[in-house]
Image: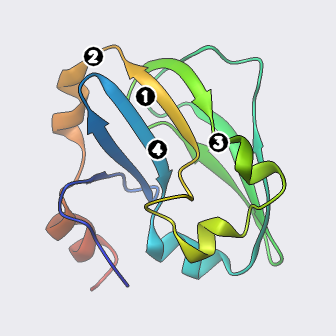
Amino acid sequence: MTFPVDLKYTKDHEWLRVENNIGIIGITDYAQSELGDIVFVDINKNLSDIKKGETFGTIEAVKTVSDLFSPVSGKIIEINSDLESNAEVINKDPYGNGWIIKIEILDVSEINELLDAEAYKALIGQ
């Protein structure tokens, strides 16, 4: 299981990569392993602005369905359209091609409230 140190993490198992004022969001390697085989990702296409902690969609695995929560507030600027036909890429590459949405971050101070890799590892008992 990997925990890239350049990412920030939530207690709900999402990750955030910040590039300038753009946030790329996905689920962690731990989350995808707990969910099992991911078969579908449903992003609320009616959302444009999202608040920290707000649900922006669901992720469906063979075993369960789980909500997706935004780690920071922002404006959704892109949804990973590849997931529509290839949701299982999240299982194979959760921190790369398995990203879920990109947002324009509204309040960069919210990033400081997220976990670093060591704190996230401690949270999940690694």
Real-space Cα distance between discs 3 and 2?
A: 23 Å
Q: Between disc 3 and disc 4, whose residue precedes? A: 4
At label 3, counting other C-alpha atoms closer than 10 Å, the crowd grade (few under 14, some 14-19, many 20 or more) is: some
Which residue is denoted by mark 1 in the rendering? 52
Which residue is more in the foreground, 77 or 109? 77
Which residue is denoted by mark 2 in the rendering? 107
Residue 87 at x, y = what percent? 74, 61
Q: Residue at point 54% right, 58% down?
A: 97
Please name which of the two marks, 3 or 4, marks the residue nearer to the observer.
3
Q: Amino acid at mark 3?
A: Asn
Q: Is residue 1 above or below residue 98?
A: below
Tell me, for residue 25, which label it has, or none.
Answer: 4
> Are the residues flagged by discs 1 and 2 in contact, CB closer than 8 Å?
yes
Real-space Cα distance between discs 3 and 1?
A: 20 Å
Real-space Cα distance between discs 3 and 4?
A: 10 Å
Q: Between disc 1 and disc 2, whose residue precedes? A: 1
> Are the residues flagged by discs 4 and 2 in contact, CB closer than 8 Å?
no
Q: Find numbered disc 4 in the image and state the secondary structure of the residue it sits on.
A: strand
Q: Is residue 98 above or below residue 23?
A: below
Please name which of the two marks, 4 or 1, marks the residue nearer to the observer.
4
Q: Amino acid at mark 4?
A: Ile
Q: Residue at point 18% right, 63% down?
A: 5
> Are the residues flagged by discs 4 and 1 in contact, CB closer than 8 Å?
no
Which residue is denoted by mark 3 in the rendering? 80
At label 2, counting other C-alpha atoms closer than 10 Å, the crowd grade (few under 14, some 14-19, many 20 or more) is: few
Q: Quadrant of the C terminus?
A: bottom left
Q: Quadrant of residue 34?
A: bottom right
Q: Between disc 3 and disc 2, whose residue precedes? A: 3
